[in-house]
Image (cartoon, rainbow, N blue to C red):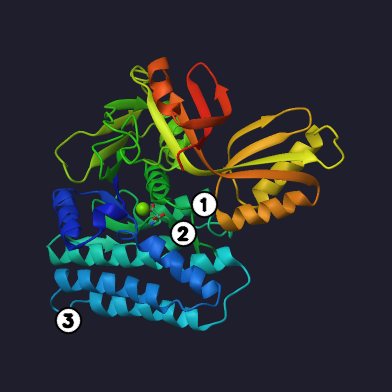
Amino acid sequence: MKVFKFGGASVKDAESIKNVCAIVKKEKSLVIVISAMGKTTNKLEHVVNDYFNKEDYNAPLRNVFDYHKNILHELFPDEKNEIWPTFQKICDYVELYLKNDPEKDYDKTYDQIVPIGELLSSKILSSYLSLSGINTNWLDIRKILITDSRFRKAVVNWEESEKNTQNAIGDSTAIFVTQGFIGGTSGNLMTTLGREGSDYSAAVLGNMLNAKDVTVWKDVPGILNADPRYFNDPKKLDHISYKEAIELSFYGATIIHPKTIKPLQNKNIPLKVRSFMNPSEDGTMVNNDTTDDGLMPIFIYKPNQVLISLSRKDFDFLEEQHLSDVFDILHSNKLEVNIMQNSAINFSICLDYEKKRIEQVVSDFQKNYRVLYNANLELLTIRHYDVTSLSEMTKNHEVLLEQKTRSTLKLLMRNLQE
Ligand code: ASP
Ligand code: MG
């Protein structure tokens, strides 16, 4: 069994769906894990926000429906195709859901709406493959990947999900199409695994099926040593180890979701990152072998960071018990620390700036601590850094915090040109 994961960019229009069809045409014993088409997840987040704030959500919702409808018209001109009523059913479900008053819990509300992106894309792909003569089984992952109800950061119940995966797929030689990013609770509520979570879904399924390998198809040639959105002339890494890959994703390289590596490493399943635009090229191979790690510096850039500094109100020391309190508060707000530093009376943490969560955590901290914070910062991490790369990177920036180990340099900076 093999697992292929296709992200939003690889299924963003009718042409791309045809391209996926060409890539999987010759395969058998394959599970295809798919994300929502194009920027659908972002658009659905708008719908959720407008609905939750009791504003008019119709424009973004129509936008999602029309976008999919246009693709359907191109792929299935015959309106008798089974995809048409399926599409309508999913649209009806959301419209009906949105007629109720919003629940109190934002994350729970989000998870009952946003997953329709993946339901739509997987239905469309599966129907199009069938139409092209490739027989597929569409799998409802909500009944297979069973999670807890930690909405928007749901945790997979490994034992139950593994049983379900084996029952649904096992060692079948068929082609399956299913949804990434989403799961379901045992009480039939939808859950999501965190933004960009489809890679993780693919890795979890790969693990549970003892897959031969897992391939993530991307719009870049493979894993690059720098993000082409922010750096000139990035170079492809032909091969890196699981260890290097997990470090990169932990520091914020967006090419793979941070949780993707562990399920694969645990069973020694190779991960391939390949270009859906050049499917004949090899891409990057990630496995146990560490010999190629560190051959060139790797740059990871994370914009939109906030630095929060905490101190005790009475100029007291920050002791271990306070640190444990700080981490409890972070955990209950579902926030992860990107870099931290302590002194006698200060504890500083750098986090991704997610407006709602940051406002909440600041207000939680303010009950017991003095809180200062700085937003709009950039976190640059360089693995295997060299001196020449450094001066270029820090030009026009003020460095607020710096941390160095033998292999990794982290700089939290403010851009002075903005
Ligand atoms: N569609 C989801 C997102 O955009 C999950 C994914 O693409 O991995 O975050
Ligand atoms: Mg995506």
**Which residue is at the far front?**
417
Mark on residue 80?
A: 3
Residue 134 point in image, percent of width and height:
15, 59
Ligand 1, image quadrant it occupies: bottom left
Residue 258, percent from left and from top: 46, 40
Q: Earlier in the sequence, mark 1 or mark 3?
A: 3
Which of the numbered marks, if any, corresponds to residue 183? 2
Label 2, label 3: how far apart the Cα atoms are: 30 Å
Q: Which mark is residue 156?
A: 1
- Using the rendered view, name the quadrant where residue 141 is placed: bottom left
User: In the image, residue 296 lies at what x, y percent?
Assistant: 34, 20
Viewer-closest of 33 and 321: 321
Q: Is mark 3 within 8 Å of ligand 1?
A: no
Image coordinates of residue 204 in percent, x first then y, are: 42, 46
Q: Quadrant of the N terminus?
A: top left
Q: Give the total of numbered labels.
A: 3
Residues tagged 1 and 2 counted as in contact (Cβ below 8 A):
yes
Circle 1 SS class: loop
At 30% across and 38% down in the image, what residue appears?
228
Bin the neighbour count of mark 1 within 10 Å (Cα to Cα): few under 14, some 14-19, many 20 and up: many
Q: Nearer the viewer, residue 350 or 32?
A: 350
Mark 3 residue crowding within 10 angstroms, few (<14) / some (14–19) / many (20+): few
Q: At label 1, which amino acid type do we have?
A: Val
